[in-house]
Amino acid sequence: MGCRRVDADDLVALALALDVSPLALLLPTEPSSLVLNGNRYAAERIWDWARGDQALTGDALAFRRDSNPLDWPEMEAVLQRSLEGLSDDNKAAMLRSRSRNIARRRSVEDAARKASHGDN
């Protein structure tokens, strides 16, 4: 059987056809790891990175800002009020929690909008 590369458009089309996130086609679902610069990362950490929840390396705040452009204005406002005096680990945990809450709220809003338009 022949092999061919899948470009980003193909990946999105496949994900839509299978009714899954493109991440489900790209990332491990079983216990596995990624090695980057000699550091090994568990599958859960890889998923957090791919969702934009947690940097693997570098500045965690810059990673969050650059990886979540739609959520950043709201996250920035929350950060300015609530991150003063927290440790880096606590800041990262709060950022992950806020991001998931925003994503959940958007998902509920999208489902409600679809239901009101009869898109189910």
Image (spheres, rainbow, N blue to C red):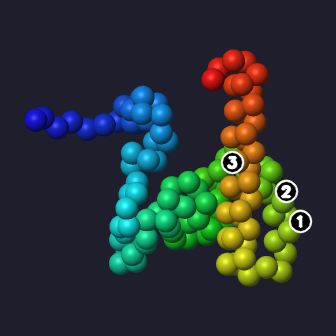
Q: Which mark is residue 47?
A: none
- Kindly indicate the quadrant of the structure image that contains residue 35: bottom left
Mark 2 and mark 1 residues within 8 Å of each other at the beta carbon:
yes
Q: What is the spatial separation of the Cα atoms under label 3 and label 1, in whole angstroms?
A: 20 Å
- The C terminus appears in which quarter of the rendering? top right
Q: Is residue 49 left or right of residue 53?
A: left
Q: Which residue is mark 1?
A: 81
User: Dot 2 corresponds to which residue?
Assistant: 77
Residue at 51% from the left image edge and 55% from the top image edge = 50
Q: Secondary structure at mark 3?
A: helix
The earlier-in-sequence mark between 3 and 1 is 1
Q: Secondary structure at mark 2?
A: helix
- Is disc 2 surrounded by few (<14), some (14 to 19) or many (20+) residues within 10 Å? few
Residue 108 image position (x, y, % from top left): 73, 39
Look at mark 3 in the image and give the residue it sits on: 103
Q: Report the amino acid beneath label 3.
A: Ala
Q: Residues within 10 Å of mark 3 (few under 14, many from 20)?
A: few
Please state the horizontal and vertical placement of residue 21, each as a whole percent of the image. Answer: 49, 42
Mark 1 residue element: helix
Identified at 84% across, 60% down, the residue is 78
Vertically, is 12 above or below 34? Answer: above
Disc 1 marks a residue whose amino acid type is Arg
